[in-house]
Amino acid sequence: MTIEIGEHIRSIEPYKPGKPLEELERELGIKDAIKLASNENPLGPSKKALAVLKKGLTGLHRYPEGSGRRLREAIAQKHKLKPEQVILGNGSDEIMDLAAKTFLAPGDEAILGDITFAIYHISVTAHHGISVRVPLRDGRYDLEAMATRLTPMTRLIFICNPNNPTGTMIRRRELDRLLNRLPPNALVIMDEAYAEYADDPEFPNTIDDVKRGAPVLVLRTFSKMYGLAGLRIGYGLSTPAVVAAMNRVRLPFNTNSLAQAAALAALSDESHTARSLRLNREGRRYLSNAFADLGLTFLPSQANFIYVDIGRDGAAVYERLLRKGVIVRHMEGPRLRISIGRPAENRRFVKALGQVLKTGSR
């Protein structure tokens, strides 16, 4: 039996996640590999979250609370919003897809950067929308150029801030200019998966935009700073009307009970967040200095990773690093994205990279 697949689906390049540690060790017969590829928190989850997970195992025969009421209330309290302004997702990825599913009709347009998180284009295309790609400028989202691409068909504008994979950020004044030029029925999706790591004073507080009823949907996740990537849980913040519309197409029980409970505990563990932020700042400074010493070009990062141009075949360097038990992320051409790890992991990576570059792979 042959089932015809629509061209819009056949045109999608599937998302390729980073190589798992276990797979690399099995393939190459090595042990103690390190992974600096998926922007995970090297400290792992909060101890409070782990304690809650153990307690929750006995209730797995029960369905979770469908809307995640307790977690939504805690998130709303944290951001001084109303619970009806919060929607939970199986990772913030699911909320991106829900937005495309809710607000795009066939032929509608979504504007996004040309080097950014791949799920935006996948979701837009899968829901019969048209991706309008706008080149980055100096590795940053060019909101002025994006504004010139706005049309009456524009329904969604995706902005990753800080951007994945470049780690760069947009500023308040840039966002304000774009918001002031939006056509009717356009929604700006601010993907802030790495916002907790940003320390630039000009990083925009988009929660304020939500509070004043601006047409924005702010996405956050528990996968990065909070170390719960394996549980897949994130959230979105917007007006009650936007959230209510997405809840119409959200599948029931889309976030599991363990994820809800662990996220609730992690949200209150400020000491773990402070340790994670401190570790990231120190690692970001160390890797930046190391890249400068190696004469490599890299972009200043506001996230927990650094985007570096190694000036040669990036795929070849990536493969040679794998053979040294170091997993990074090859992006395109000579560019790699390096997640910030623990100090020993960062040092091991720098040593391995120096060896690979010294032996040459031009």
Image (cartoon, helix red, strand yellow):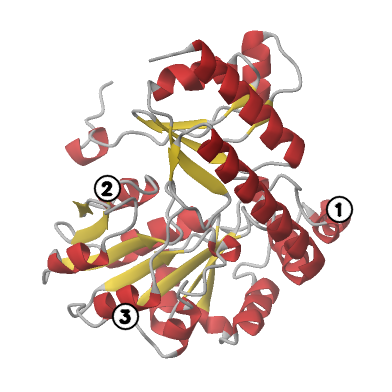
Instruction: Answer few, some or many: residues within 10 Å of disc 3's Cα (few below 14, many 20 plus, some between 14 and 19).
Output: few
Please indicate, yes or no, whether residue 257 appears anywhere in the rendered image: no
Q: Residue at x 56, y 58 (%)?
A: 254
**Residue flagged by tag 2: what amino acid is it?**
Asp
Q: Position of residue 87 (x, y in %)?
A: 52, 71
Residue 353, by quadrant, is top right
Q: Which mark's residue is nearer the viewer, 2 or 1?
A: 2
**Residue flagged by tag 1: what amino acid is it?**
Thr
Answer with mark 3 or mark 1, whichever residue precedes in sequence.
Answer: 1
Q: Please tell me which residue lies in front, 53 or 350.
A: 350
Q: Position of residue 122 (x, y in %)?
A: 33, 45
Would you name the residue on which mark 1 appears? 58
Would you name the residue on which mark 2 appears? 114
Q: Is residue 141 above or below residue 218?
A: above
Q: Position of residue 117 (x, y in %)?
A: 39, 48
As measured in the structure, the alpha-carbon distance from the residue carrying label 2 to the one carrying label 3 is 21 Å
Is label 3 in a helix, a strand or a loop? helix
As measured in the structure, the alpha-carbon distance from the residue carrying label 2 to the one carrying label 1 is 46 Å
Please indicate, yes or no, whether residue 34 appears anywhere in the rendered image: yes
As measured in the structure, the alpha-carbon distance from the residue carrying label 3 to the one carrying label 1 is 48 Å
**Residue flagged by tag 3: what amino acid is it?**
Asp
Q: Residue at x 44, y 78 (%)?
A: 238
Would you name the residue on which mark 3 appears? 176
Q: Are marks 2 and 1 in contact (CB under 8 Å)?
A: no
Q: Quadrant of the C terminus?
A: top left
Answer with mark 2 or mark 3, whichever residue precedes in sequence.
Answer: 2
Q: Residue at x 38, y 66 (%)?
A: 170
Instruction: Answer few, some or many: residues within 10 Å of disc 2's Cα (few below 14, many 20 plus, some between 14 and 19).
Output: some
Residue 198, by quadrant, is bottom right
Q: How many marks?
A: 3
